[in-house]
Image: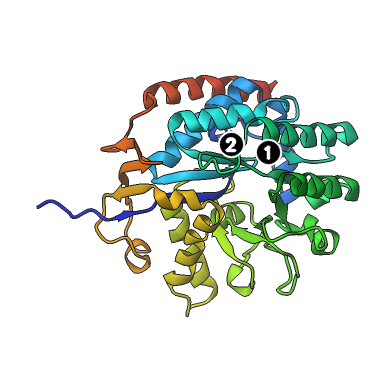
């Protein structure tokens, strides 16, 4: 007997690091991290230093392909590649759009590489927003990225906020993810706007006073052992992201619900479902996309307890992007093969 198939609008990954698509199987760090800052220093900051434009292109294509296969039609990306800054955002946008997926990307400004490094990050955001983003384009958007306040001077934070205001976009920034960023709200409160994206918020006080959308990344928070954000305590709008661990948003919803339930036995799947739907407020064009699923009833109380729901057909911007689980615009086997080649290059660079 054939099973009925449910459908929804395209899902949104509200916070991704597409460059992390090549991280799987990377060599062990030189020292085993014992805290969050150690994870950043020994894993992610080493990885982003090793990236070049070829690696960035194929990691973005692989991340977009995997998003599409999971029914995610829009990605909000946060990028950093200190030795390949100029042009990096254009490479990402073109790669993701080639797969057929919508993209909003930015470069994470930071003072980790000095004043000059921060200036180069600002310049890449400015260049991309001027040259590659057209108002009203539902396939390609941008913001101004900031890594996190604890790696930025007050001058860099103010410059990023001013650049965002100039382009009429928000700032996409990691906020209070770990203990090293506690008290960040006092540094950025007056800068924030309603169109800002505040990523993580684990260590924010309930009454932080920041404007913007909180993006909850439960899988990443658990993986980095930084604590539980409990976004239901905030009055801000909330959306769900993955922080670079793929873009399977139904799986992220399921984990968000289970973690919420672990914290509060009275919690229902409805809260986590509202966070999943929060992505449509950030990328409303995805609501015009259509995903046909392998399961018939796509609503919170069914999805929360149903494993391995898969996207069967996906239409983005009115055009087919996935049919019977297979991408229609690109060769999925080629993307996986090329991404594997770039992963080998990246891992070799890390070992060196």
Circle 2 sits on which residue?
Answer: 20
- Answer with left or right where residue 72 lies relative to residue 164: left
Q: Residue 24, image x and y in percent?
A: 53, 34
Q: Secondary structure at mark 1?
A: helix
Q: Quadrant of residue 203?
A: bottom right
Q: Residue furthest left?
A: 1
In front of the other: 168 or 41: 168
- Counting the numbered discs, the total is 2
Relative horizontal placement of residue 96, taking residue 116 as reference (left or right): left
**Position in image of residue 135 (x %, y %):** 60, 42
Residue at 72%, 29% in the rendered image: 49
**Marked residue nearer the N-terminal end (2 or 1):** 2
The answer to the question of whether label 2 and label 1 lie on touching residues, with beta carbons closer than 8 A, is yes
Camera sees residue 163: yes
- Residue 27 in the image: state x and y as whole percent: 61, 30
Q: Is residue 250 above or below residue 84?
A: below
Q: For the residue labelled by badge 2, is the local secondary structure a helix, a strand or a loop?
A: helix
Q: Residues within 10 Å of mark 1 (few under 14, many from 20)?
A: some
**Is residue 156 shown left or right of residue 202?**
right
Residue 70 appears in which quarter of the rendering?
A: top left
- Colouring scheme, one of rainbow, by chain, secondary structure, one colour: rainbow
Would residue 245 be visible to someone looking at this image?
Answer: no
Question: Looking at the image, is 307 positioned above or below residue 246?
Answer: below
Alpha-carbon span between mark 2 and mark 1: 9 Å
Residue nearest the observer in this picture, 32 or 9: 9
| Residue name at image x 27 percent, y 61 percent | 297
Residue at numbered disc 1: 44
Residue shown at 33% from the left, 51% from the top: 308
Relative image position of residue 2 (x, y in whole percent): 13, 51
């Amino acid at each position: 007997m054939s099973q009925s198939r449910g459908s929804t609008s395209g899902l949104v990954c509200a916070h991704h690091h597409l460059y992390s698509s090549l991280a799987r199987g990377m060599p062990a760090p030189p020292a085993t991290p014992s805290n969050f800052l150690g994870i950043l220093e020994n894993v992610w900051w080493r990885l982003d230093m090793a990236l070049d434009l070829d690696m960035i292109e194929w990691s973005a294509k692989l991340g977009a392909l995997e998003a599409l296969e999971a029914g995610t039609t829009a990605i909000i990306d946060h990028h950093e590649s200190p030795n390949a800054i100029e042009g990096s955002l254009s490479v990402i946008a073109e790669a993701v759009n080639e797969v057929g997926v919508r993209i909003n990307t930015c470069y994470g400004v930071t003072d980790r590489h000095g004043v000059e490094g921060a200036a180069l990050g600002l310049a890449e955001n400015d260049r991309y927003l001027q040259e590659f983003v057209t108002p009203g384009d539902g396939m390609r958007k941008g913001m101004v990225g900031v890594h996190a306040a604890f790696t930025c001077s007050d001058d860099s934070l103010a410059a990023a906020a001013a650049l965002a205001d100039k382009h009429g976009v928000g700032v996409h920034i990691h906020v209070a993810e770990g203990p090293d960023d506690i008290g960040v709200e006092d540094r950025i409160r007056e800068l924030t706007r309603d169109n800002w994206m505040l990523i993580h918020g684990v260590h924010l006080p309930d009454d932080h006073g920041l404007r913007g959308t909180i993006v909850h990344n439960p899988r990443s928070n658990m993986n980095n052992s930084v604590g539980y954000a409990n976004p239901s305590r905030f009055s801000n709008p909330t959306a769900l992201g993955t922080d670079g661990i793929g873009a399977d948003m139904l799986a992220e919803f399921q984990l968000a619900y289970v973690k919420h339930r672990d914290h509060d036995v009275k919690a229902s799947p409805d809260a986590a479902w509202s966070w999943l739907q929060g992505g449509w407020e950030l990328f409303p064009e995805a609501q015009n996309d259509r995903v046909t699923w392998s399961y018939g009833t796509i609503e919170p109380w069914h999805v929360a307890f149903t494993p391995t729901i898969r996207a069967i057909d996906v239409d983005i911007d009115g055009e087919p992007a996935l049919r019977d689980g297979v991408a229609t615009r690109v060769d999925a086997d080629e993307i996986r093969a090329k991404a594997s080649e770039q992963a080998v290059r990246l891992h070799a660079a890390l070992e060196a």
